[in-house]
Image: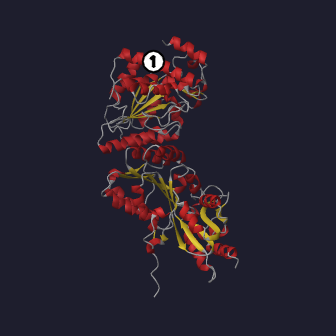
């Protein structure tokens, strides 16, 4: 008898579910939305009307009002579509969250939904390919990019406990659980070596971890590539990550974002390059180009060499098989 | 702590603050002196007129009124006031802009400044969030946001204006230093902001427009406006003159970017005695 299929769930539902639970006792927890919803959010609106505000389609004000509440000691979740939260309100994030967090506590959790190509057929205005880069450029902002809803759910307690600004890069569609069988993994671990291997290690984040898991299944038996799922990009326990990556010779990073622009590839490369370990790194993602092609996500991935089949072929090649 | 002094004393304080602002500009010519001269009476009325609750020894005391200087570059004239009240040592003023000083051309982490501004259009949204939080805490504290009229070109101001009006944040007072000049000239020639009060009225605000250079008058207006709780956020449009007290700046549409020479400042100090 085979094991039951992992439960599929949207990351936002897992996170908002925890927020709903917490609101029963945390009267200083606020949920702000830029006119963006979710079924469980309807319950928050109904059950905690004093702690829920829809600021309208106004991402700048979403972040500023959240900052003002946080300056008074409140914990605030600010919820919007990722492609608008990170860039439309970038200056508010920079000044009112990042800069102020250097001199005072600012517990604002930017809950950004629609990572990467989540909204595939909505087209390039709704793709979130730059958020890892732009958020990573700001000091003091925690950058969380989970690969499943179990981590997203777990992050809620971390969000309450750590009084810093945070950016949650959440997948837009339901994804199967990865960490349901790994209850020992903590947010502070920053990453998890989902598959221990030799020679070649794939480092992925968010939805691409599912693609990578699929790819590794396609690699011929006998070959043993590794897989590291990086979910807390900042603050990163670089020493631990280097210890893990140091057991390999080649690294392939894969993210659903722009590469060569300061995103996950830059985080991993700068760490590895400064270490003197001499690892070879190849970075996969979107390079200096928006995605104008139309179609389902898997199809779009295939056009850019980011699908499981292409990744498996690259891993095989790098393994010298 | 809050100070209360009479009208004549307020006018004297304003004179002194204007002199100190000029002196600071001489020490640090990068300071935006014209912008910092139009809001002098606003700060004097707020800080010496008994309108605010504050504790210089504990700038983040919970009971304090939250004052957000959204036009950060115009905050130079607040430096001498905060030093005088004991928020920081007076000799900080003499060292402005040097590695030994906490004071720079646009205030950053300076005791007495509620937030760090300088990039325009942030203060009203942040102030709205704080005003909400104060209500929820059951606090009687007020939020006062000081903004320039050129800043009203920022779209984020209007997002916040809608929000504050709709949510009836009557513990929030916005003071617009209506000096009618932006960096590149007169605001009415850039995009006319008139009728300013009507715009805010339409968003559910209570509005008052009055002279912003009579310290006693500003005091009288704010004394009514700030404590009022009538279900509306409040705006005081303070009619001011950019570069007030310096004839060459007052007459210059581009005065925002003008620096005064040390000799000019010395001459003006005599005039303002």
Element at label 1: helix
Position above or below: A235 against A296: above
Residue B232 point in image, percent of width and height: 35, 36
Give the residue displayed 50% in from the left and 64% down from the top.
A146
> Residue A249 versus residue B21: which sits nearer the camera?
A249
Give the residue displayed 55% in from the left and 23% down from the top.
B25
Where's the C terminus of chain A, which quadrant?
bottom right
Question: Quick one: which residue is furthest to the front in this view?
Answer: A276
Residue A296 visible in the displayed image: no
Where's the N terminus of chain A, which quadrant?
bottom left
Position above or below: B170 against A303: above
Question: Quick one: which residue is furthest to the bottom in this view?
Answer: A1
The quadrant holding residue A216 is bottom right
Decide if residue B170 is on the left or right side of residue A165: left
Give the residue displayed 31% in from the left and 52% down from the top.
A27
Specify how the rendered protein is coloured. secondary structure
Give the residue displayed 58% in from the left and 51% down from the top.
A137
Decide if residue A200 is on the left or right side of residue B36: right
Residue B62 point in image, percent of width and height: 33, 39
Residue B44 point in image, percent of width and height: 41, 23
Residue B110 visible in the displayed image: yes
Residue A133 point in image, percent of width and height: 59, 55
The quadrant holding residue A91 is top right
> What's the chain of the residue with tag 1?
B
Decide if residue B211 is on the left or right side of residue B142: right
Position above or below: A237 against A310: above
> Residue A78 versus residue A25: which sits nearer the camera?
A25
In the rendered picture of this protein, how many numbered marks are placed on residues? 1
Residue under label 1, please give it: B16
Q: Could you classify mark 1 by the number of other residues whose Cα lies within 10 Å: few (under 14), some (14-19), or many (20 or more)? A: some
């Amino acid at each position: 008898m085979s094991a039951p299929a992992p439960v599929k769930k949207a990351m936002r539902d897992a996170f908002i579910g925890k927020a709903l639970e917490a609101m029963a006792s945390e009267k200083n927890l606020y949920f702000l939305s830029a006119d963006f919803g979710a079924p469980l959010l309807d319950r928050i609106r109904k059950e905690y009307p004093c702690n829920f505000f829809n600021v309208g389609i106004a991402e700048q004000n979403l972040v500023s009002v959240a900052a003002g509440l946080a300056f008074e000691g409140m914990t605030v979740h600010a919820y919007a579509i990722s492609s608008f939260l990170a860039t439309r309100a970038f200056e508010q994030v920079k000044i009112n969250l990042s800069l102020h967090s250097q001199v005072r506590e600012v517990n604002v959790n930017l809950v950004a939904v629609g990572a990467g190509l989540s909204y595939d057929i909505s087209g390039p205005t709704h793709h979130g390919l730059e958020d890892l880069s732009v958020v990573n450029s700001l000091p003091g902002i925690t950058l969380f990019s989970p690969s499943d809803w179990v981590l997203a759910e777990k992050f809620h307690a971390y969000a309450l406990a750590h009084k810093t600004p945070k950016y949650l890069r959440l997948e837009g569609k339901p994804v199967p659980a990865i960490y349901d069988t790994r209850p020992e993994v903590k947010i502070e671990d920053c990453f998890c070596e989902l598959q221990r291997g030799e020679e070649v290690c794939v480092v992925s984040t968010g939805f691409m971890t599912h693609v990578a898991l699929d790819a590794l299944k396609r690699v011929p038996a006998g070959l043993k590539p590794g897989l590291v799922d990086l979910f807390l990009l900042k603050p990163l326990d670089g020493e631990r990550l280097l210890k893990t990556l140091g057991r390999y010779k080649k690294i392939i990073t894969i993210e659903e974002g722009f590469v060569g622009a300061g995103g996950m590839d830059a985080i991993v490369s700068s760490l590895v390059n400064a270490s003197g370990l001499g690892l070879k790194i190849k970075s996969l993602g979107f390079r200096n180009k928006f995605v104008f092609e139309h179609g389902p996500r898997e199809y779009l991935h295939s056009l850019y060499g980011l699908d499981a089949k292409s990744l498996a072929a690259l891993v095989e090649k790098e393994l010298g098989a | 702590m809050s100070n209360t002094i009479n009208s004549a004393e307020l006018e004297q304080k304003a004179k002194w603050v204007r002199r100190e602002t000029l002196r600071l500009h001489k020490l640090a010519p990068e300071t935006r002196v014209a912008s910092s001269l139009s809001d002098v009476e606003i700060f004097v009325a707020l800080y010496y007129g008994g309108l605010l609750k504050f504790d210089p020894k504990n700038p983040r005391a919970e009971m304090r009124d939250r004052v957000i200087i959204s036009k950060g570059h115009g905050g130079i004239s607040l430096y001498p006031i905060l030093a005088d009240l004991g928020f920081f040592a007076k000799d900080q003023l003499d060292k402005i802009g040097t590695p030994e000083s906490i004071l720079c051309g646009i205030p950053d982490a300076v005791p007495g400044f509620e937030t760090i501004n300088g990039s325009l259009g942030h203060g009203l949204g942040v102030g709205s969030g704080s005003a909400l939080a104060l209500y929820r805490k059951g606090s009687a504290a007020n939020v006062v946001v000081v903004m320039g009229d050129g800043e009203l070109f920022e779209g984020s101001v209007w997002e916040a204006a809608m929000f504050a009006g709709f949510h009836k944040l009557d513990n929030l007072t916005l003071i617009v230093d209506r000096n009618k000049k932006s960096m590149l000239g007169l605001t009415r020639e850039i995009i006319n902001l008139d009728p300013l009060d009507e715009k805010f009225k339409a968003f559910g605000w209570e509005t008052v427009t009055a002279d912003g250079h009579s310290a006693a008058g500003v005091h009288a207006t704010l004394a009514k406006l700030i404590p009022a709780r009538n279900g509306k956020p409040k705006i005081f449009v303070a009619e001011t003159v950019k570069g007030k007290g310096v004839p060459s700046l007052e007459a210059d549409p581009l005065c925002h970017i003008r620096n005064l020479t040390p000799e000019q400042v010395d001459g003006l100090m005599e005039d303002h005695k």
